[in-house]
Image: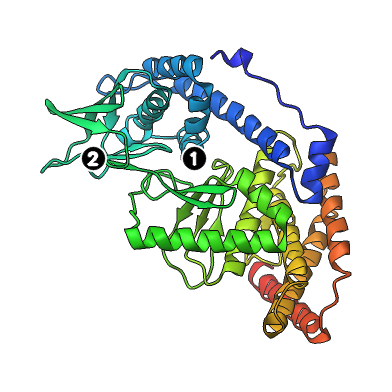
Amino acid sequence: MNPQEFPRHRVSSEMFAQVCDGTASESTIARLAEGELSRRLLQLRAVLDAVRPSSESFVDVESAWGLIERAEERSSAAVREILMAPEVGVWLRHVLHGSNWDAPVDLGYLHLVAGSVAMRAGIPFTLAVPVLDGRIVLPALGWIRVSLSFPVAVAELRGVPGGAELRVLGRRLDVSITPASPLFTPAQWCVAGPLSVRLSDHDPYREFEGPNPARPLGAEEQVEWAKVIESAWEELNAVQPERGVELAACLTTVVPMEPDAGTVGASSRGAFGAVALSPPRSADLLAEVLLHELQHNKLNALMNLVDLAVDDGSLFYAPWRPDPRPLPGLLHGVYAFAAVVEFWAAYLLKVPEAARVEAETRFAHLREQLRRGLSSIESASGLTAFGRRLVAGVDRRLTACDAVVVSSDAVARAVDLVDRHHRTWRSRNG
């Protein structure tokens, strides 16, 4: 894989218009993902060119790259599957922004990536791999338990037909890469209609930084997460079927976080396809969070292909944050809020009468936040021509949502909440 031969990516006017208007087709999501894959290949090559392991390191960067090249010849789908794992994207950002190259968990992750690619492609290999908390993590595939009575830092992993061999201090362990294996635990998947997402609870780079220790889910927790994800997708699909299709095309991974008082979601520029979530209170709120983070995923991928804003250090008011935001952050906010406002506008058409007051209040508050956010960003000099087109698209979508009639009490409360937020923000930030 010569970087000079990587494909060039162009954003068509139709593709850009889809993103501006809110809902991207499956083909548009696929093109955004293709751009992300090329970016990761370039980042991987940059890591290999920059890394100079110490003489004591077990990592062989050229052998790892060669293994990935051989896998590409056998099965490009295998390379894509592993490299597009969100955790791999987070790892690449982490190591390219100043890593301890000799830390086994950092540079050693390269061997885990290469081994997973080769294993998926069915290519024999032998690699030294890091052992983290008694586990060998195979990105996107699962993890191998190293069952010894004492801790070890490095093991030898060999890919063989039907599985793997593990050698630890001269001891051989045969590992069957199947759900029935006593040593291998496959990745856990949740399926809802066309949506299929992996629960990531072991990979050290799952939480959009790194590395972090594993936080394994129990069997009951896995079942509960599968239920709430299915309920949220069904809710989103019932309210906005086109958004259900978009979510299924983009979302690949859910990172369960510690329980929290409310529904919290997060995403990362390096983790296309992933959303980190704390346990939700209800299906409609989880649907909102998934939809919100989906917009960040799309915009992150688009911003890797098109310049939308220049961060010149200017800071702006965002009605949903306590702190001043840089222009790219505010742009992300208004874009994500537009989708959420549209969701609640559609939800109001189907909401049971008993829940209408709460839904109107939520919709009116979000709509007012979006209005003030747009007011904050529209005059920003750092927006490029494409950025201004994106903002204009959000403005059109807000205008359409302004036609949705809610009670005067809901409107007044929304204005009051945002006014009070602004006063608090000004007293804190000047």
Whether 138 is drawn above or below 257: the answer is: above
Classed neighbour count for the residue bearing mark 2: other residues with Cα under 10 Å, few (<14), some (14–19), many (≥20): some
Task: Provide residue 51's location: percent of width, then percent of height.
Answer: 42, 22
Q: Amino acid at mark 1?
A: Val
Quarter holding residue 225: bottom left
Q: Is residue 268 left or right of residue 406?
A: left
**Residue in the image at 45% along x and 18% along y:** 71
Task: Provide residue 174's location: percent of width, then percent of height.
Answer: 20, 30
Q: Are marks 1 and 2 in contact (CB under 8 Å)?
A: no
Dot label at residue 90: 1
Q: Is residue 165 left or right of residue 191?
A: left
Classed neighbour count for the residue bearing mark 1: other residues with Cα under 10 Å, few (<14), some (14–19), many (≥20): many
Quarter holding residue 128: top left
Dot label at residue 183: 2
**Residue in the image at 32% along x and 30% along y:** 102
Q: Nearer the viewer, mark 1 or mark 2?
A: 2
**Residue in the image at 72% along x and 79% along y:** 361
Q: Name the N-terminal-most of marks 1 and 2.
A: 1
Closest to the observer, 326 or 191: 191
